[in-house]
């Protein structure tokens, strides 16, 4: 037999046998220690009590051994205020006072501060064997039992495993795996003990977090039960060619039954296969990640469909222009309209007016225009006339030449008003006819008229014909202009490369996203020409619960989410102070705190959400409405919105109800409502509200409302 051991007593065996026969559980409740009567001895199974008991107290824990299911482990912690004696024996007692097992314990002194000068807690663990450990039940008083360190660590591990955020994995698989032995995954040789994320198993129920083993793999301890695999589970991947340095989350909605429910994971952030570089066109997924890039050189490459090609535009311009380049038009003002130049014999640049230069082809150049220039015709003070062009009436004159004034040979005989006769000798031969009647010859210019002039015409027989009041020829001075170009863009030649550049300037190119969770002074990254900002205020806390008797029920309302602002800035964004509002803090049996205000300098501000109300401590309780919304955001050039109010209390009075859920922000849901006696759930999504606490009847307790989530500022940087 070992030096130190635990024996089932004869009385204990008899008690166990009786319980089995009656189908009753074995109930163990207390443990005692003794000093062995002053010396070490070997306990026997016939014992019904310790030799000399010095202390007795409730068992802290009783559980099966992990390796041997027929072994039971009993634990107790002796408080520091008792002692001053040696421990040499221990006994485990049933609820009926039977000494079930007796322990030979290594001689140890239990000091006490009052007499020994020092004090300590004394921990005893006993291992004993039973024929059917599943029948053994521990009866404890949870008001006096102290938790052991091992129990606390185990409890913490279990509770931490239920959180959405998991410990990182070494690699994430890129295809279906056989879950056995070490192997190569995404370019990494994994070994026993490595954590692996599986997202592409043929049976989606097998997806999740696994630990590599030399034999069969097992799920990781933080994701091996349904309670630990929750919607929104997130995990980072450390290594791998395709998936290294990426963040994944579980998109499957609850309820989830592990090893039965199909699990779907998606990459939130990480490598998408697009190579580093500068791209004019990007393909972006629902998480804002660039999944494709190109550098098109045409409008079609940019996906612009509501426009014409360069040849189509030029054809439309040519068709739309009623007058071709080179047409001469008279205008009654001194300012040529767009597309025209005055015919003033001036020198123009061929580069500026390429169409007109090509059309005139240097016809009116004198030789002193300089390289790259051409000369316009002269029209000032001139009548335009038709070119003879082979008719023969004005032969010998080329196009563009001038013609001096000329009258054919003719005579004028004037009428002597004093003698009332014609003077045959009085003749004017052509030239100036001022003050004398003039004959109207074929080919005269038509003009505006002055109807106050009297004219007398002489016929071939020297008879005076007086036709009454006649008209004298007049003319109107105009500005003669020439059509110089057909389009206001580059004088008839559309520069497609320049047009593409203008399109690029108007739209911009996405560069990067900055997620700001703490106060800082914003400075943009390289190449930033404008920014898109999104900010949400801190979420309000949920209301606490306040009860004083077992007849009362108290449930707090959920906190409101923070307000939301969104917009663009094209200048003045560097150096702006970013303030991120904190989530409201839940308070014990009181109204929690409001969410903090998030701002981007003086450009935009998003107030925090209001706190959820505290439930009344009356029976029946007062049903509360929703908590107040946040104030409306200001400064957003695209969106200025208020936060969403938290949920109120729901359900029948004193039988079943739930506390209020937190208000959802634009970035996700608020805290969930509670349906049992517990404090409010803390919010997770940025800017969302905390949940209300709930204290049900028969469980009077004061509880804290859930904390609201901190706000956030997200800035997209664009060229």
Image: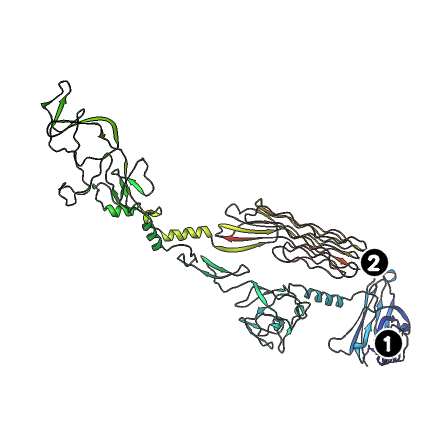
Disc on res. 100: 1
Q: Is residue 701 left or right of residue 433?
A: right
Where does the image place residue 332, in percent across and percent down from the top left?
30, 36
> Quadrant of the image for the N terminus?
bottom right
Q: Is residue 413 left or right of residue 41?
A: left
- Of tags 2 and 1, the one toward the viewer is 2
- Asked if 450 appears above or below 607 in the picture, the reply is above
Relative depth, front residue between 334 and 661: 334
Label 1 CA crowd tier, 10 Å (few <14, some 14–19, many 20+): many
| Residue placed under numbered mark 2 in the picture | 551
Secondary structure beneath dot 1 equals strand
Secondary structure beneath dot 2 equals loop
Label 2 CA crowd tier, 10 Å (few <14, some 14–19, many 20+): some
Where does the image place residue 234, in percent across and percent down from the top left?
62, 64
User: Residue sitting at 13 percent across and 43 percent down?
Assistant: 392
Relative depth, front residue between 172 and 267: 267
Q: Residue furthest top?
A: 418
């Amino acid at each position: 037999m070992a030096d130190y051991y635990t024996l089932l007593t004869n009385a204990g065996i008899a008690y166990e046998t009786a319980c089995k026969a009656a189908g009753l559980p074995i109930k163990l409740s207390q443990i005692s220690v003794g000093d062995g009567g002053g010396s070490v001895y070997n306990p026997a199974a016939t014992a019904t009590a310790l030799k000399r008991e010095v202390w007795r107290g409730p068992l802290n824990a009783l559980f099966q051994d992990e390796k041997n299911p027929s072994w039971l482990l009993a634990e107790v912690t002796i408080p520091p205020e008792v002692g001053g004696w040696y421990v040499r024996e221990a006994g485990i007692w049933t609820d009926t006072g039977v000494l079930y097992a007796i322990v030979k314990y290594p001689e140890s002194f239990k000091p006490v501060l009052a007499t020994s000068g020092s004090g300590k807690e004394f921990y005893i663990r006993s291992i004993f064997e039973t024929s059917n450990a599943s029948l053994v039940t521990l009866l404890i008083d949870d008001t006096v039992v102290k938790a052991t360190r091992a129990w606390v660590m185990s409890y913490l591990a279990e509770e931490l495993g239920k959180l959405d955020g998991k410990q990182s994995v070494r690699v994430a698989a890129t295809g279906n795996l056989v879950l056995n032995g070490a192997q190569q995954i995404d370019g990494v040789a994994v070994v026993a003990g490595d954590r692996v994320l599986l997202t592409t198993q043929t049976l989606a129920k097998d997806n999740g977090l696994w630990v590599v083993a030399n034999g069969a793999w097992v799920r990781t301890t933080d994701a091996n039960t349904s309670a630990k695999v929750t919607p929104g589970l997130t995990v980072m991947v450390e290594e791998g060619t395709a998936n290294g340095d990426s963040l994944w989350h579980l998109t499957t909605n609850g309820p989830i039954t592990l090893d039965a429910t199909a699990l779907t994971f998606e990459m939130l952030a990480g490598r998408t296969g697009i190579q580093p570089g500068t791209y004019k066109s990007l393909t972006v997924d629902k998480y804002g990640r660039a999944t494709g890039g190109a550098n098109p050189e045409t409008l079609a490459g940019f996906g612009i469909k509501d426009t014409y090609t360069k040849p189509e535009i030029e054809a439309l311009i040519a068709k739309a222009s009623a007058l071709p380049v080179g047409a001469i038009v008279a205008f009654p003002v001194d300012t040529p309209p767009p597309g025209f130049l005055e015919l003033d014999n001036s020198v123009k640049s061929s580069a500026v007016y390429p169409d007109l230069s090509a059309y005139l082809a240097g016809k009116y150049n004198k030789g002193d225009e300089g390289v790259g220039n051409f000369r316009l015709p002269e029209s000032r003070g001139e009548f335009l006339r038709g070119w003879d062009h082979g008719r023969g009436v004005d032969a010998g004159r080329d196009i563009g030449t001038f013609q001096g004034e000329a009258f054919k040979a003719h005579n004028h005989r004037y009428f002597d008003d004093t003698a009332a006769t014609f003077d045959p000798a009085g003749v004017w031969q052509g030239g100036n006819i001022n003050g004398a009647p003039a004959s109207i010859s074929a080919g005269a210019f038509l003009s505006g008229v002055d109807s106050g002039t009297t004219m007398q015409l002489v016929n071939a027989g020297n008879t005076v014909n007086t036709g009454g009041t006649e008209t004298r020829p007049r003319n109107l001075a105009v500005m003669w202009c020439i059509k110089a170009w057909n389009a206001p863009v580059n004088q008839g030649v559309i520069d497609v490369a320049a047009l593409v550049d203008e399109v690029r300037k108007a739209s911009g190119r996405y560069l990067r996203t900055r997620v700001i969770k703490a106060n800082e002074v914003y400075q943009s990254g390289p190449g930033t020409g404008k920014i898109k900002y999104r900010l949400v205020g801190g979420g309000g806390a949920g209301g606490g619960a306040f009860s004083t008797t077992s007849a009362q029920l108290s449930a707090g309302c959920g906190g409101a989410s923070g307000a939301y602002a969104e917009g663009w800035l094209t200048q003045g964004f560097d150096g702006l102070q970013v303030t991120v509002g904190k989530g409201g803090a839940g308070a014990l049996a009181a109204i929690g705190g409001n969410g903090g205000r998030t701002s981007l300098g003086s450009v935009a501000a998003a107030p925090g959400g209001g706190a959820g109300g505290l439930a009344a401590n009356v029976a029946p309780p007062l049903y509360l409405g929703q908590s107040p919304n946040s104030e409306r955001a200001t400064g957003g050039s695209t969106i200025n919105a208020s936060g969403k109010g938290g949920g109120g209390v729901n359900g029948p009075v004193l039988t079943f109800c739930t506390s209020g859920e937190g208000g959802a922000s634009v970035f996700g849901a608020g805290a969930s409502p509670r349906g049992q006696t517990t404090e409010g759930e803390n919010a997770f999504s940025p800017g969302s509200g905390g949940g209300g606490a709930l204290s049900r009847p028969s469980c009077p307790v004061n509880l804290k409302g859930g904390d609201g989530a901190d706000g956030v500022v997200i800035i997209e940087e664009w060229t």
